[in-house]
Each structure stands twice: as C-alpha cells, then as structure tokens.
Image: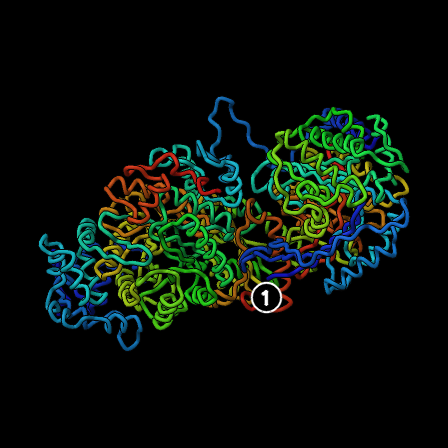
Amino acid sequence: MEQILKSVGIDIGTTTTQMVLCAIKIENFAQSWTVPSVRIVDKTLLYKSDIYFTPLKDAQTIDVVAIKKIILDAYQKAKLSPGEVDTGAVIITGEAARKENAQEIITLLSGLAGNFVVTTAGPDLEGILAGKGSGACAHSESHACTVMNVDVGGGTTNIAVFNNGDAVESACFDIGGRLIQLDVNQKITYISSKMKLLIETLGANLIVGKHADLLELKKITDTMASAIVSIAKGNYEDPIANLLITNHGLKEKFKLKGLFFSGGIADCMIEKKASIFEYGDIGVLLGKSLTQALISSELPVLIANETIRATVIGAGIHTTSISGSTINYDSGVLPLKNIPVVKLSFEEEKNSGRTRIEAIKKRLNWVVHEGVKPLIAFSITGSSHYGFDALQLLAEDIIKGLNQVVESDQPIIISVEHDMAKALGLSLRRNLSKEKPVICIDSIRVDNGDYIDIGMPIADGQVLPVIIKTLLFGY
Amino acid sequence: MKLKTSLFNQVYEFTSVKEVLAKANEEKSGDRLAGVAAETAAERVAAKVVLSHLTLEDIYKNPVVPYEEDEVTRVIYDDLNTTIYDEIKAWEVGNFREWILDENTTGDMIRRVSRGLTSEMVAAVTKLMSNLDLVYAAKKIKIKAHCNTTIGGENVLGIRLQPNHTTDNLDGIMISLMEGLSYGVGDAVIGLNPVNDTVENVMKVLKMFDAFKRKWKVPTQQCVLAHVTTQMEAIRKGAPSDLIFQSIAGSQKGNEAFGITADMLQEARELVLKQGTSTGPNVMYFETGQGSELSSDAHHGADQVTMEARCYGFAKRFKPFLVNTVVGFIGPEYLYDSKQVMRAGLEDHFMGKLTGIPMGVDACYTNHMKADQNDIENLAVLLTSAGCNYFMGIPAGDDIMLNYQCTGYHEAQTLRSLLGLKPIKEFADWMEEMGLLKEGKLTDRAGDASIFMK
Amino acid sequence: MSEASLRKIIEEVVKSYYAVNSEASPKMCTPLPMEIPSIDSDAIPDITKTTIESYFAVPFAENKDAYLNYKKSTPARVGIWRAGPRYTTETLLRFRADHAIAQDAVFTNVAEDFASNKGWVEVQTVIKEKDEYLTRPDLGRILDEHAVSTLKLNYSTPPKVLVYVSDGLSSIAVETNAYDTFKSIEMGLKAKGISVAQPFFLRYGRVPAMDHVSEIVGSEVTVVLIGERPGLATGESMSCYMIYRGKVGNNESLRTVVSNIHRNGTPAVEAGAYIADIIKRMLDEKKSGVDLKL
C-alpha cells in the first residue's frame, strides 16, 4: 500500500524567494501477519520555482502583494492548487524575518499553503533545514561521521552540525551578501546595523551614500570569511565571530569530517561572475573571500548537492516525519500547530508514584504559566519493557501530573519514543472522561525546547504526520 | 514378484511395492506421521530384503502414483530412455546397488543407466545403501551444468550466497552480499529468498545484484527466489535474471500446492532462455525437501524418500543448473533429529546425482529440532566427500529471514581447503585478482566487506 | 536572565527536591523490570548483551565507518572476522548461546504453576509429553476428554470473545508475553464495550486446537496466544491467531494472525491494543482471515 503526500516548501529569504513542491511516498511495510508499519520510503522533488528576488517596499517592509503573486504564480506553474498540498513549511529566513511585517506575511501564506503547513522558523531550524537540503545531513549518516553545513545567504549565515544523521547543534551569524548594498555607481545604499559595528571595529572607510572602495569592502568580506573559518575550526573565542553572532554561537567542539557550503553565496564560491557588483551587494566578493580563506584552512570542504535551494528543499522535503503505526487519537482536534514539547527524562520516568507525578508537574510548569492555555505535548522515552501493570501506573501518574491539562479544555497530547502509544492511549483513557480528547503517538523523538505540529491522519488513519521544529539546542 | 520373507523365523508379508518402499526406509518421523513406516526395526530390514529382490521392472510397473493420475509420474515416464531401460529391467535392486558400488563401474556408465531409471528405482536402491555407500557412490557421479559458469566440475565446490534479510532492506542485503563474496562465497549463485513476493521487489533486487556484478566483474549467476510467476513477470519487464527458481514437489497435487505445473516451468525456461541475461543452456533452479508432499497432504500414501526422488525425476526435464534439497528445514515431525537429517541429506544428494541432475544441499536445521551446528558441519564434510556440487553460504549460518541455521560463509574455505577443492574456475581467478585468495589461502582482505565499499 | 539559565536553575531545584524526597519517602519499587542484575565485578561480561548490529571485529577494515553504517541495516552476523577460515571464539560462543536459548524455549515445559498463578484453569491436548508434541502435530490440535468437559462446564454460556493461551513451540514466549497481551486486549475491548471471557491455558497445543476449542465453547471469536518457533536468540516471540466461528478442519486462510510479539518486535501490551481493534472488526464484519481486509 502506497500513498503520496504532496509537500510544499516556501522560503522567503533576505535576498530571494523560492518555492518547491515535493512528493513524499509512504508505504505500509507490514506483512499480513504483522502489525502495520507505515514508513516514508521516498522523497522526490516535483517542481522548483524560479528564484525570485524578495520584493521589498522599502528597507523595513516586505511587499506582501508581490509575494502573494509570486507564490500563486508558482502554484500555477506547478499545476497545483494550495488545497491539494498535504504538508510542508513556509519559512521566512534571515533578515526577512526581522522585517516589520514578517508576521503579516506568515498570516497571508497560511491561507496559501494548505491546511497543514508550518509557518515559522527560527534561525536554528533554518540552519538545520539548509543542512538537510544541501545533503550534509545525509552525508553524515551514510558516512557515519560529523559534518557541518554552512548556509551563507544574503542576511545571515546559518550553521548546523550533524552527527550520523542527527542535528546536534546549530548557530546563526550576521554574515551575508546583502548586508552592504551598492548602486550601479558603486555608491553604498545600505549598511545593516551589525555591519556598522563591524566597520567601526575594523576602522574601515565605508559610509552610506559614499562611493565604496573595493579594498575596504574586501576587508569586510575577508573578515567575515575568516570568522566562518574560525567557527569551523572550533575557535569559538574569535572576537569577530562573537560580534557577528545573531542569537547564539556553537558550544561543543567537533571533529569535522566534512564542511558543506550552501546558500546563494556558495554559488559565488564556485562560479566565475562577470562582475564583482553584479547583484549590487558584497555577495560575490564574500564568495571569493571564502574560497581564498578555505584554500589555506585545510578544512575538509565537500560539495553540497544543493546550494541556493538548500533551505527551501529542506523545508519542502525534510520537515515531515510520521508517527508509529499503532497509535491512539481523536481526530476531531487535529490538526494542531506549534505545540511546545515537555519531556520527562528517562531517569524520572523510571520512578513511580509521587516522585514521578511531581517531576511531571515541574516540567509542565516550565512551559505552562498562569493565564496561558496548557497546550503541550508531553513526551517520554518509554520502553519495550513495560508490562501491563507498569503501564497502568504510568498512565495514572501522567494523568495526575498533567492535572492542569486534564482540567483545561486542551487535549491530552503524548508522544513516546518506543512503540507503546496505542496501549498507553487506552490506559490513559481509562482514567479520563469520555469527552476528553487524547492524542497518543509514538516512534517520535523530541526534546524540551522543540515544537511540534500534528496533521490530519494519513494511510487509512494508521499514522499521523508530525513536523518537529527544533528551535533551541543545548540548554 | 515376491513380497514376503522371514527373519529369525518371523514372517513378514507386504501387500504392495509402495508398502515395501516405505517400510524399507531408514527411520524418519515423517513416515511415522504418515503412518507408512515399519512398525519394528526387524520389519524394516525384512522390507529391505524384499526390496533387494524386486526387479527394476517390478518397480517400473508400480509407480507410487499412477501415470494416469499424476503429471509428475507422466513427466518421468515420458522422458525415460526405453532402450536403456530394457537393458536393465531384469536387474534386482540388490544387484543394482552392487553394480553401482563396483570399482569398474564408472560415473559415465552410471550416468547412461540413469536415463533408464524411474524415480522409484532411484529411491529403491538408495534404501539399500548405508551412509558410506551413499557417499562413495555419489562421488563417482559428476554432473556438470552451465549457466554463466560451470558448476559440478572436478575438484570444485560451489557455494550459493544467500543474503536474506528480514525486510528485504537493500543495504542489509548488500552488506551480506559484499561480505560473502570476500569469503569466496557466491560462485554457485547469488540468490535471495525475498520477503515480499512482488514483481517490483524482485526487479529492485535483481537490478542491484546486476549492477554490483558488473561493477566488480563477478563471474557468477544471480536469481531472486520468488514464485516462478513473479520472476517471469519481472523478466518480461526487463529484470536482469540469469536463472528462474521454483520449489517443486514429487506429485502433481504437491506442485498444485506450490501453484505450478510442468507447462508453467517449461514456459519459464523458454522465457529466461529468450529474455534472461545468462549464457545457458542450464537456466533453472529448483529446491526440494523430504516431507513437503506430506505437509500438503499430497504424498499418496508413499514414503518421503520416494516422493523426494520423484522431485528429481521431475526436475530433470527442465535441465536445471541448480537443484538442492533443503534438508532440515521442515521440522522434527518429518526429520526428528540430527541422525535423520544426516541420513536424508546423504540420500537426497545421491538420489539427485543418480537421477542425473547437478545436485547441491542446503544442510540445515530449525530450532525445534534435536540438531545443532555441529551436526550440520558433520553433514557438510560427508557431503563434500561425496562430491556435492554446492552448499548455502549465510553469515555465520544464521538465516535471519527464514529463521533456520545452515552452513555459513566460513564453511566455504574450510571445506575447500580440507578436501583440496576450489571455487568455480572463473570465480577462483576473480578472487585472486581481487586479492582475496592467494595460493589457496584466504588473504587478510577476505572477510572485510568494506573492500567493496567505494 | 536568559531562558536557558533560568531553566538551569529550575533543574537544580528539581534535582535537590528529588535528593531530599528520595530519602524521606519509603523506597518505591521500580515499576520497570529493566535494571540489569548486578553481578560480581570479577565475573566475565555477558556476551549476549552486545547487539549483533553493533558487534564488529574486522581488524583492519578498509572502510570501518561505511561498514558500521551498513551493519545498522541488518541483524545478520556480518563483520565478525575469522580465526583462519573458522569463526572467532566469541562468534562461535555467541552463536551457541543464541541457539541454546532458542532450544530451551522449545524443549522446556511451561511452568506447572503458570496458569494457577494467574487464576487461570489449565487443560491439555491428547498429547502426553514434549517429544510426542514435536512429532505429532496432528494430535496437538485435539483436546483430551478432561479438557472438553472442563471447558463445557466453565463456558456454559458461549462467550462473544474467548482468548486463551497455549505453549506452542516456545514456553518462554508465553510465560513472558501472554499475560500482558491478554490484559491489554481486555482493556481495548472493554473500551469498546465488549467483555472477554476468563482465559485458560492449553498445554501441548498447536494452532488448529483453537478450532476444537471454538466448537466446544461456541465462542464467536476465538483467540489463541501461542509461542512461535524460535529463531536464534528470539525465543520470546509469541503469535496471536484469531478466527471467527472456528470449526474443526476449517481452512488455515480463515485465521487472522499477528506475529512477532516480543520486546524487540511488537511489545506485548502494544500488540494487545492492536489485537483488540482487530477483534472488534471481526465481530462487526462477522469474518476473519483472508476475508477480513485489514
């Protein structure tokens, strides 16, 4: 049994706006004598839009009408209507996310991108998506090693580290091709606030409205490139790199077996551009600086499968996963979006009675505060060792620990790593009123700090699509 | 025809050739389950005495399933060389045994006589043989066959590489394939028992095997052991298959349980000769096993050795490249313990060779049988001495998909070096080129699958 | 103060809370029997603790990373290296250990008090001992006279759903999984308003014995939880066979099966929850086996 899910990816970045459409093939691998086992078997790209310049009304505002036209146009070219899309992600990335009307764009696109599509992405998720789209993540898995993906775009550089197919850390830096812009006469038209700081630090002579000297600009891009090299080498104390941090840098030091570059600037690293200022910014120059810095760095630079489209492909193809195939849910409350995850550690889970209940309450209080509706996904590791009686105790403790949720009008949402959701769901319901909606899914690995979306049932209702949004690492 | 004798003054009388054949069998739990076994050890010997005095003509006239009722009997009788049969029909089974064992009787002489034998005759003489007789006699009979390479040559021991996987995961199959080749396994065939018997799956695996074979220039043949109809459909759709496989039984009813007929196999053979990827002319692969007819209630009151012999008579029509009995797979209700498995393995191999087919053996056991890996190693040594064409090769002998144990990759080189044998010529040369084999010994690269991971 | 550091503080508080609490409150038993029993530190480590997937012994592999990665995709015994042409000692012994546990699962009888400990009645087929059981599958499907009269008495009103347990080819499998699976089936059916009859244990039973049971008891749906023929190191695997209105001699294709119930397959409780759904479908559609499209 096969089913095709149509997934859309839309990336509105500092410089460019792109869309992809993908087919995610799921298949039930069960034999007639085993329990169902639905898995994703194939992901293919159906359609890639042109790469559009992100339309801006002015430096602070994205042109909503123009964006809408671009997306509708792309749908038309792909011969698809927004209603036919099952899943996917719309993300506003880099500098674009900081524009004043970013939220307005998200609201607009929610209607244009199907019923079940993610609509936000922090810089961490963006970096991970780029690394998945570029092929870095897959490389780390097939070669059983640790790799770093550096997605250098117009406004930001998103870094993600993958070990054996898992994202382990991410970071974001204000390094990009459009942070300084020029007109045809090489006169500076825009300098981002962080760049002003950098210019000041370096004592470079670059002022908005004045002609830019190539060597002065190169000073900036060389510094950016050396900051990236520092990060890749694990030299996190580099003061420039620290200055350019967007939200947070990396913590752990890694022994990298591969360093991938994606994003628009990656193209500038390999291609010979006709003119340095073809795009009216420092992108081409930054690409050249990076190439030079990497040659002498002895870093294991590898070719990415996708460069400028890495993030949008990551968003389109790699955001959706599916739950285990024996689960328990009330479809009436689906789909659910942006649910924060509250996870009990396995050590805490192994306790019982009051200790366990209190641990659940404590964890819950991290996310649920007074006046906030207690919409949370409670997550545990679970184990294949649960017997029936131990499972009943667990269910009772969860109900007691999640008392706040039980008494609210929110559904009970539980995600377990091990295959036990159907039995746990039944056990929970024994302790609840019939009307209380329960969503209990398994084979999903999430952690505190993640957010998840849960979609409408697929594969004859056997599985639920889940989008895991990792927004924060390593706290 | 005399069906009566006495031992130690006790009279034993039998009512039919079929009964004599059944009771002359060495003890098998399957014959007991079928209710056809000798009641006592003495009755068994009495049946053997009676059998030894039956002529081949007596047996010819009494097939265990009548010609009119059964396609397998018809195939065997229709293909018989009547001139040769006429020459030997007066022989008693006991004399026939001694003729085979005579030093002056050569393999070629036996192969000629084979053409005049029905399967019941083959089974009959087997029942009079001791285990060492079966080894000694089988050793004389070399049966070669050619697909892409030649199996059954002098001083050659082939191994089928069986990279089975619980879910047909391609990476999982691939690692077993790579490691097996590095141990010198896979010269007989690379053959997967699939979990999913679908055309798409068969095509996927065959294409993977084909690409690997081409990349590394491996001189062998490949096959996916799905149902014959699935394989045919895959070949029609362009799947690169060198062979067509099917499990067969010793009666029409048994074959119906497998969903096959002689015509279907003929069509399969013609298809693979026309659209397959191999040189030929031998392009069929069959598996059998004592007890399979009883398990589908298709034994017609005959014993399991005789029914097994009939499988080989049936197989012979299709000029197979490989035939092997899966000797301990079926369980203790048919072959109770290691003693019975070993006996059956030696019987099946000899019967196959006497029938004139290129016989190999899957020497194996299940976990509800009183047998273990030591027994299978014993059987493998005996069969190698008997000139068995090939065994199975599985990682450590543990088949994770079929849930049984048989000979492992490590047995290949052990058996070859022990008895001065080599892989099939082209494959041995390939191993030397790959630096896996040097002066008959495995090199440090052998056992490292990652030499193929580039 | 950043969120991260705030949480760190909360974590510390939580930790200290546990530290105090665990001393103050009476020691509670761990509900999960997952603790590895502690053994003397001078004992030789348990060789069966290493998963086959993670065991690797090729000394100078040309590409160890890729090898290990391939190994993740299969439980086959690859990457085990050799001693001359033979197996290394550890591979040999591991194989023997895995075979031993499988053999023990087959040749050991289910404990005498297995049924009574759970308040279940024990009955038997006409088979008298293990050897006969293994060689006479035809007899393992017939209940003896005592069993027939006991069941007739205990189930005088034909139940809608009858679940029973039988040893089959693995005693360990039913001892480990049958209770949890049964309780989970019962919970699942109860949630759908369907009651389940009290189970019993049938010694020396083969799968088709369920047809005899169906005829004796008159149950609408009959379910047997039965030990599977063990594979290497998988002696704990149990199957569940279900039939709608079973009759002696009915076609095997009328049975619905869920197999591979064990810790490393489908865990017992989870399987039970799934089986309850199937039983409900059988009752609704009044059929089982190939006729019931799952």
Instruction: Say how many tags the image has.
Output: 1
Crowd rating for badge 1 (residues with CA inside 10 Å; few <14, some 14–19, many 20+): few
Spot the residue most to the front: A185
Spot the residue most to the bottom: B68
Residue A314: image location, x then y, percent: 70, 48
Observer-nearest of A409 and A244: A244
Observer-nearest of B143 and B272: B272
Seen at 37% across and 57% down, the residue is C136
Rendered position, A1 above or below B212 = below
Left or right, A281 with respect to B316, comes to right
Rendered position, C58 above or below B353 = above
Left or right, C260 with respect to B321, comes to right
Work out whether residue A403 can be spotted. yes
The color scheme shown is rainbow
Left or right, A10 with respect to B133, comes to right
In the rendered image, the quadrant that contains the N terminus of chain B is bottom left
Residue A17: image location, x then y, percent: 78, 51
Residue C92: image location, x then y, percent: 39, 36
Examine the image and state in which quarter residue A268 appears: top right
Chain ID, mark 1? C
Q: Secondary structure at mark 1?
A: loop
Residue A142: image location, x then y, percent: 57, 42
State the residue position of label 1.
Answer: C293
Q: Amino acid at mark 1?
A: Lys
Spot the residue most to the left: B104
Rendered position, A27 above or below A424 = below
